[in-house]
Image (spheres, rainbow, N blue to C red):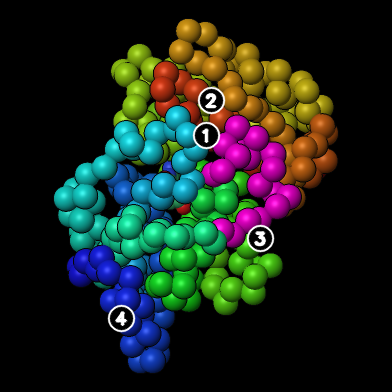
Amino acid sequence: MRIIESIPEMQQASESWRCAGKQIALVPTMGYLHEGHLELMRAVRPRCDVLVISIFVNPTQFGPGEDFERYPRDLDRDIRLATETGVDIAFIPHVDEMYSEGYQTFVNVTGVTTPLCGRSRPAFFRGVTTVVTKLFHIVKPHRAIFGEKDFQQLVTIRRMAQDLNMDIQIIGHPIVREPDGLAMSSRNAYLTPEQRRKSTRLHRSLKEAEVLVRKGEKNGEAILKKVREVLAEGDDVRIDYVQLCDPTTLKEVDRISGPTLLAMAVHVGIARLIDNSVLIPSP
Ligand code: AMP
């Protein structure tokens, strides 16, 4: 695996692959890789000639007081795991080169970024869409893959790619979970063993909601009530939001009349965990 740090070097390499007719795929990450990231890489590996991952903890998507400084990092381990997974290029840019002095350009998607995580993290999506646009211009991929764990992020990036006529295929990948159901996340590293046990409530609450819907429950409030019960707020568990919405527009719904996104963000200790499931009503 080749490591590229410089932006012009990455752009030149991508240009030469494109001229040679090679298909480029990109997996953007913030590093501290886990099986969720590696599954994205494995899924896109057969669909490209050159597999590029980016590792960049993007400061513009963190708000004041959020975890930018303490976000977990282990570059040596990331490089080893990416190499073992068959990645060709790890693009690891420096913050000073990505956001050089005088930087003042941002990409802003409206609408779908307003609800859910947009409420409690107002700068987040603007940072994500800006950095992803920059990565697209630098790596020039034919396709890029994103996890459904960050469902609103995936919807936002699809919206941006469509609205800005980006000639890049956006691929979504299902959530990869630990054996006990917890969605894999670099932020799970923040959890104490006790909090780690409590974190399985997120997935359990989604499963309970799926059961209700399978049994024919259509009333949104009844489903949300059950979910909140399973999440059981306490000393170190606090719900940020639990919401039902249309999976494409992310507009809130109060009845399950078609596929419906059940999305949640829950603070467990210092970790803010997100999870979701698309509920499918029985016919
Ligand atoms: P991150 O490094 O957390 O920014 O994530 C990089 C990419 O990996 C994003 O597209 C995430 O949605 C995806 N990802 C992270 N965790 C998971 C997971 N448990 N399952 C599927 N995709 C994931």
**Between marks 2 and 4 in the image, the one whose residue lies nearer the viewer:** 4
Callout 2: few (<14), some (14-19), or many (20+) C-alpha neighbours within 10 Å? Answer: many
In whole angstroms, how far apart are the C-alphas of marks 1 and 3? Answer: 21 Å
Callout 4: few (<14), some (14-19), or many (20+) C-alpha neighbours within 10 Å? Answer: some
Q: Where is residue 98 in the image (x, y as percent from the top left)?
A: 38, 61
Q: Which label sits on residue 159?
A: 3
Earlier sequence position, callout 4 versus callout 3: 4
So how many labels did they put on this image? Answer: 4
Cβ of mark 3 under 8 A from ligand 1: no
In terms of secondary structure, where does tag 2 sit? strand
Marks 3 and 4: in contact by CB < 8 Å? no
In whole angstroms, how far apart are the C-alphas of marks 2 and 3? Answer: 26 Å
Asked if residue 145 lies in the magenta stretch, the reply is no
- Above-or-below relation of 258 to 214: below
Marks 1 and 2: in contact by CB < 8 Å? yes
Earlier sequence position, callout 2 versus callout 1: 2
Residue 6 visible in the picture: yes
Residue range in magenta is: 106-124
Quadrant position of the C terminus in the picture: top right
Q: Main secondary structure of the magenta part?
A: loop
For badge 4, the amino acid type reads Ala
The residue pinned by badge 4 equals: 13
Callout 3: few (<14), some (14-19), or many (20+) C-alpha neighbours within 10 Å? Answer: some
Quadrant position of the N terminus in the picture: bottom left
Q: Which label sits on residue 274?
A: 1
